[in-house]
Image (cartoon, rainbow, N blue to C red):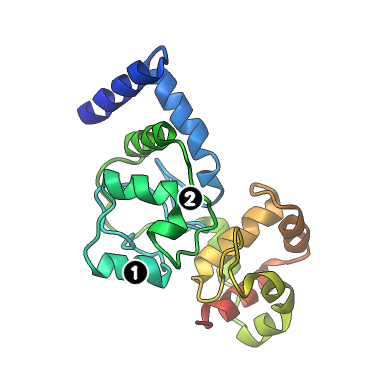
Amino acid sequence: MMRLAVILVGLAFATGMASADDATARGEALFRPCAACHMIGEGAVHRLGPHLNGVSGRTIGTAEGFRYSASLSEAGAEGRVWDDVALDSFLAAPRNYLPGTSMAFRGIRDAEDRAILIAYMIETGGAEAPQGEVAVDPRIAAVLDHPPDEAYGAFLSSECTACHSGGGEGIPRIAGLAPQSFAAGLLAYRDGTREHQVMNMLAARLGDEEIAALAAYFATLE
């Protein structure tokens, strides 16, 4: 925490903010777009993306209980770590730093904003990864309690593949996505905590059984 305090005080001084509290508030604001997919802090669980507790200093692609894209898994196998430089490079342009990542985020151009966001993530999520299995959001667990009917998921999948088969700019690839992450994303669109006009409309038509079937089907794809 001492390191963080120094960072925040330095950032506040450098940017003309009145205090470290102002830097923390700005970090919280910068994290809000991330919160559509990631949780951080007490009680954080994996959602569409992995929880970010302890991300600083963690080997890339190794949060327990989350299934990563091949690009992040390979980076972890090479021993690459989320240090300050790696986090800054990734937040600047995720798809340039790790081509093939499924994260649909264009990046943060401003270096000062990236530094404040990284400091906020360290403050909120700690510097060491939590030990043991990460709890699953009860809503997601309830969906995944349904039998994994892959055939039904394949039948329902045409509306998904119309946009997501290629994973274009701003459109993540969903083939091979872990069922937990897939279900978390659709639930967020269904209840409106994540906003996208088309996805909100499509997800509103899906019940828990349909989401479970789609999650099971897409998890089987490469």
Q: Is residue 135 visible?
A: no
In the image: residue 92, left or right of residue 209: left
Give the percent coordinates (x, y) of residue 41.
40, 41
Say which quarter of the image contains residue 14. top left
The residue drawn where x is 67% and y is 55% is: 189
Give the percent coordinates (x, y) of residue 146.
60, 74
Question: What is the CA distance from the residue labelled 1 to the residue labelled 2?
Answer: 18 Å
Element type at mark 1: helix
Say which quarter of the image contains residue 62. bottom left
Which residue is at the far top?
18
Closer to the camera in the image, 60 or 1? 60
**Which mark, residue 73?**
1
Please tell me which of labels 1 and 2 falls first in the chain.
2
**Which mark, residue 38?**
2
Q: Amino acid at mark 1?
A: Ser
In the image: residue 184, left or right of residue 76: right
The residue drawn where x is 62% and y is 75% is: 165
The residue drawn where x is 64% and y is 47% is: 193
Q: Amino acid at mark 2?
A: His
- 141 shown above or below 15: below
